[in-house]
């Protein structure tokens, strides 16, 4: 059985000048194959450790006046051996206990309003799943394009389930069909969501009716003028 061990460190920091309280949350997670470290502030993700690039990423927007986390990556890396040491001990205690499972709820949608020939991003969003491991596959017109996609970090919900996003850059062409397939141990079979490029052309009905009406109106004016001038000549 694959076991995931998660530690939460909750701290309440008080700003003595403004009298405001802020909640910091450290999440340390590990399994046999994965490592995860995240620090959140007031329910928002602020930092996460990129163990492949060996650095700490600050994900807060510039306008939020983000704080620094000196030595953050070293702190995250130092927690991994502790997490895995405890994981080995917990494997024995939880060996015969069933692991709770929640299947992901999946959706696919474009990041921006669709315009033919304009670069866009398709988002595959899978939410409220546990345990935190999913496999994602993308196709375009039946061909695998997973290698062109990206996968976000896990985002923790208040009920201890997770959200995650996968992104695929694309240039929409009429008739193209994209799929995002999510695999998770709580699913009986892979869940595939489909997005077809189908950009509706603007309706020409009102313009046609307006043009025809204007033409008929002008024709009536010309006809009336013709008979008026002709009648004046005979008089």
Image (cartoon, rainbow, N blue to C red):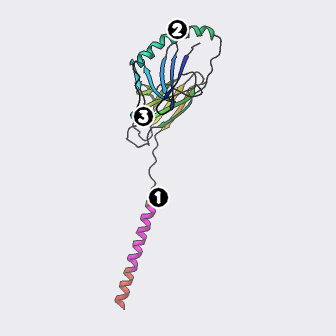
Q: Range of the magenta residues?
A: 208-224
Q: Local crowd at mark 3 within 10 Å, few (<14), some, or many (≥20)? A: few
The residue at which mark 2 appears reads as 85
Q: Which of marks 1 and 2 is nearer the N terminus?
A: 2
Task: Compute the Cα span from label 1 to label 2.
Answer: 70 Å
Q: What residue sits right under mark 1 in the picture? A: 205
* Horizontal and vertical percent position of residue 62: 39, 33
Instruction: Point out the residue furthest to the bottom here.
Output: 235
Eye-nearest disc, 1 or 3: 3
Q: Where is residue 153 in the image (x, y as percent from the top left)?
A: 47, 25
Nearer to us in this view, 212 or 149 = 149
Query: Is residue 200 a member of the stretch shown in magenta?
Result: no
The Cα–Cα distance between marks 1 and 3, rounded to whole angstroms, is: 48 Å
The residue drawn where x is 48% and y is 23% is 39
* Quadrant for the N terminus in the image: top right
Q: Main secondary structure of the magenta part?
A: helix
Judging from the image, what secondary structure is the residue with disc 3 in? helix
Q: Which of 77 and 119 lies nearest the eye of the viewer? A: 77
Tell me if 94 is positioned left or right of 231 in this view: right
Q: For this rendering, which residue is in front, 225 or 193?
A: 193
| Residue 163 percent location from the top left of the image | 53, 28
Return the disc, 1 or 3, that comes first in the chain's sequence. 3
Q: Pick out the residue farthest to the left.
A: 233
Residues at marks 3 and 2, CA–CA distance in whole angstroms: 37 Å
Mark 1 packing: few (<14 Cα in 10 Å), some, or many (20+)?
few
Residue annotated with mark 3: 64
């Amino acid at each position: 059985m694959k076991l995931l061990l998660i530690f939460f460190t909750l701290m309440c920091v008080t700003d003595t000048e403004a009298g405001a309280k802020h909640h910091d949350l450290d999440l340390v997670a590990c399994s046999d194959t994965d490592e995860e470290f995240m620090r959140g502030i007031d329910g928002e993700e602020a930092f996460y450790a990129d163990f492949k690039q060996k650095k700490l990423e600050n994900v807060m927007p510039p306008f939020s006046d983000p704080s620094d986390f000196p030595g953050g990556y070293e702190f995250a890396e130092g927690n991994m051996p502790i997490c895995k040491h405890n994981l080995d001990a917990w494997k024995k205690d939880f060996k015969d206990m069933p692991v709770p499972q929640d299947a992901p709820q999946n959706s696919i949608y474009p990041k921006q309003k669709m315009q033919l020939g304009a670069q866009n991003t398709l988002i595959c969003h899978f939410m409220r799943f546990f345990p935190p491991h999913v496999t994602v596959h993308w196709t375009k017109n039946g061909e695998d394009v997973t290698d062109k996609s990206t996968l976000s970090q896990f985002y923790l919900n208040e009920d201890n389930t997770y959200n995650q996003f996968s992104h695929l850059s694309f240039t929409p062409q009429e008739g193209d069909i994209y799929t995002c397939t999510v695999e998770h141990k709580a699913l009986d079979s892979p869940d595939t969501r489909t997005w077809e490029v189908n950009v509706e052309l603007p309706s020409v009905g009102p313009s046609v009716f307006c043009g025809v009406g204007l033409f008929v109106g002008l024709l009536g004016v010309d006809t009336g003028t013709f008979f008026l001038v002709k009648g004046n000549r005979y008089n």
